[in-house]
Structure formats: structure tokens, C-alpha cells
Image (cartoon, rainbow, N blue to C red):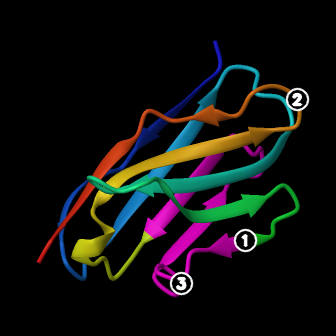
């Protein structure tokens, strides 16, 4: 069974850092895009950062200069380094793998809470 497993969320004070990880288990096939999204309470899910198979990176304006997306060489793990966290970064964070063949994959979500 193919699945994405996330880890690294938690509670941190404003200005602090967290590192999220998302590991793919099973035969995931070729990946077009790996990304992180978040959903705050009462709001829609929004894009945080993505990285293409070729290494092109895109960030939401709200996290530019503070968050860094990266992946391992095997393209089975994606990371999100989050620095200078703000209370408005509080949300459930989800990883996503967009596959060349087959349905996209979502992680189970990990809670990030930033206290002021």
C-alpha cells in the first residue's frame, strides 16, 4: 500500500523553527511534483511550497524567506524547514506527491501551532 507519512509538527513559540518530513512508503512511481500545503481552522487549504522533479521551487508569498523545501535524491522524502515562525503559520500541514501515473498522494497531516 502506497502512503505518505508525515512527522515533525508541534508547538513552538513565535520566532522558532520546526522541520517537517514526509516519507513515501510503497511503490510510488514517477513523481512530477512534491509539495506542502496547509489548512488553518476555518480556512481553505493553501499551497505553502512545491518542488518539481527538475528541482524548480515555488513558495507562497507569505513564507518566502522563512521556509525552505527540499527532498532526498531518491525523491521519496520531502522536507519543509520552517524558520521565523509566526502565529499565522498555525495550521495542519499536509504533504502531497503528484504522480505521473496514478492518483496523487496526501499525507495524514501534522499540526503546527505557533504561540505568540
The residue indicated by pointer 3 is: 64
Quarter of the rendering occupied by the C terminus: bottom left
Q: Nearer the viewer, residue 104 or 76?
A: 104
Quarter of the rendering occupied by the N terminus: top right
Who comes first in sequence, dot 3 or dot 1? 1
Who comes first in sequence, dot 1 or dot 2? 1
Calculate the distance from the C-alpha at mark 1 to the C-alpha at mark 2. Answer: 22 Å
Left or right placement of residue 2 versus residue 95 in this view: right
Image point 57% across, 37% down: which residue?
Answer: 23
User: Which disc, if any, is residue 57?
Assistant: 1
The residue indicated by pointer 2 is: 101
Image-quadrant location for residue 26: top right
Residue 2 is situated, as x and y percent measured from the top left of the image, at 65, 19
Who comes first in sequence, dot 3 or dot 2? 3
Calculate the distance from the C-alpha at mark 3 to the C-alpha at mark 2. Answer: 31 Å
Image-quadrant location for residue 49: bottom right
Residue extending farthest to the left is 116
Amino acid at each position: 500500500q502506497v502512503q505518505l507519512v508525515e512527522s515533525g509538527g508541534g508547538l513552538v513559540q513565535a520566532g522558532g523553527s520546526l522541520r517537517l518530513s514526509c516519507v513515501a512508503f510503497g511503490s510510488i512511481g514517477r513523481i512530477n511534483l512534491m509539495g506542502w500545503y496547509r489548512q488553518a481552522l476555518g480556512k481553505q487549504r493553501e499551497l505553502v511550497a512545491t518542488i518539481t522533479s527538475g528541482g524548480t521551487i515555488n513558495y507562497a508569498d507569505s513564507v518566502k524567506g522563512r521556509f525552505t523545501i527540499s527532498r532526498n535524491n531518491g525523491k521519496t522524502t520531502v522536507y519543509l524547514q520552517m524558520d521565523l515562525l509566526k502565529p499565522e503559520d498555525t495550521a495542519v500541514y499536509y504533504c502531497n506527491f503528484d504522480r505521473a501515473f496514478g492518483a496523487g498522494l496526501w499525507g495524514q497531516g501534522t499540526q503546527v501551532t505557533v504561540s505568540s
